[in-house]
Image (cartoon, helix red, strand yellow):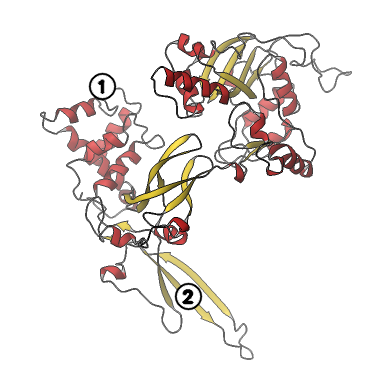
Amino acid sequence: MSISVHYRHGKLALGVTRGDGTEGDDITTNLKTIRGIPLELTPVAAFGRKPLTSENKDGGALPNAATPELLEVRGEAYISIKDFDTLNAKFAAEGEKPFPNARNATAGTLKQLDPKLVAQRPIRAVFYAMGAYSSGDASSPKSASDAHVAFSSTGDGASPSPDLRRGVAATPFKTHSEMLEALAKFGLPTQKLWWVCDGIEEVLKVYADKVVAHYDENRDLRRQLPYEIDGIVLKVNTLADWPRIPGRSRSPGYAIVHKPVPWITPAETVLKAITVQVGRTGVLTPVAELEPVFVQGSTVARATLHNEDEIRRKDIRIGDTVVIRKAGMVIPEIFEVVKTKRPPGAKEFDLFKHVGGKCPACGGMIAKDKIKTSRTVSLSSPKEGEGRGEEAQLFATQIPSPQPSPRLGGEREKPSADGQLSADEEVAWRCQNIGGCPAQLTRRVEYFAQRKALDLESLGGIVAEKLVQGTARPVRLETGSARQTESRHGRRAAHVWRKERHQDSRRTSARQDRAALPLDSRAGDCRRGRSHREATRRHT
């Protein structure tokens, strides 16, 4: 579990979880009970800088031992494999339910309200980076607000953050390895197994010899650590290079995560059934219903099958024994089918027949959108004086309104003799009942309320379903402008909300659900209540 710990003048002042990357839970009291996290830093000499002089042009480290005015360190809290087994054995002996994995045990423990209970659990920590740094001189940030993103990723995937440049300039360390050594000198627990490589050839050699140990599972890096890992991180060592490397959407450019494929542990189970879900845009997505199986720290009972073409490519059939693994160590997927264990009579999957040609949520028509391709091709030899004889022109446009599938009685457009026109179907089946399908409306309400939209708290799947119940009917929308078309989801969500608010008072459960919603303008507890009410009036 990711944590961030702030030290002010060498003393532990704040501890938080990673949260959403901007705000996390305050777990300071609980972190103070973890014996591995020092309450006070050990003063060291190599943290400050000498003032620049003619004799000292690069600014060396201060000789006097001291601690920074502000130091934020980032790391992971964990329970070791051995301690986790002991903890679960204790729970089993006491008749309590054991934890499914060490990660859940760690997160659940650190969010406990009773620090005494946290102190009884074998929580440890390891730190690997700085998030903020201030030595108290003029060259360093004066507060956490000035430096809290000093070593964070840019997030936009384009240009390095100015805060990253300032943070690198303020720190007394020239390399990441020096930073790790300094953290250990401050008395903070750090990872002992890391290597500094000079060039990609040495990286590959260390990877083969030390990380995967030539794919010997009994000697690889996982066997040398007290906790479970699923990969490694390769970082640029020189801190001055960090701001020069563009970041990606979810990670900094100076660090790359690699997860060895052999470390992905698969498991076999039986595919009991295939259900079909309807998404916000009407796409029908098949989902595998599995015999529950434990895979890499959690029990897996469902896995997405993506689409009908993917099912046919892997030849997945109901009743098959399948191999499950976690893509990226997180998302469960069907990796392959054990065809030697296939039951007799297993039939190929046909989504259209499986749902009876109707949307499973509303019973409406389903179809595949067509993609029309226009092509002009001439392969004749050029006549003298006519220039190029071979030319090809290709462009494709998707028809805005879905065309009927051949299975529904429609006719597929075919190319003419001269190759002027052809039409292809997209992979996904879609429900055509856009305004009245309850599954689509529910997903749209969730989309309407999510963090990157109106950011309405407590409006998740269950509450969205409550709001949509009894309102799934076509909604008349005026057309004529792009703005009206783009806001159709907002119109429907506002319509659903208004109708639910005016339900009969006898619907007690619905009233209780509404009372818990931050949308209620009477409570005034919605972060953007004013903008929501204005949007509702505008769409009324």
User: Along the horizontal axis of the image, is 204 left or right of 363?
Assistant: right
- Decide: is 357 above or below 271: below
- Which class describes the residues within 10 Å of circle 2: few (<14), some (14-19), or many (20+)? some
Residue at the disc numbered 2: 375
Decide if residue 346 is in sight here. yes
Residue type at mark 1 is Ala
In this view, the residue in front, 162 or 281, is 281
Q: Earlier in the sequence, mark 2 or mark 1?
A: 2
Q: Nearer the viewer, residue 77 or 282?
A: 77
Asked where in the image residue 530 lies, by quadrant, the reply is: top left
**Is residue 306 rendered to the left or right of residue 201?**
left
| Left-right relation of 364 to 54 | left
* Residue 535, percent from left and from top: 29, 37
Q: Residue 463's image quarter?
A: top left
Q: Which mark is residue 523?
A: 1
- Per the model, the C-alpha gap separating discs 2 and 1 is 60 Å
In the rendered image, residue 373, in percent from the top left (x then y), is placed at 44, 70
Q: In the displayed structure, would residue 350 be above or below residue 234?
A: below
* Element at label 1: loop
Question: Which residue is at a point 64% across and 30% down the rendered structure image?
Answer: 164
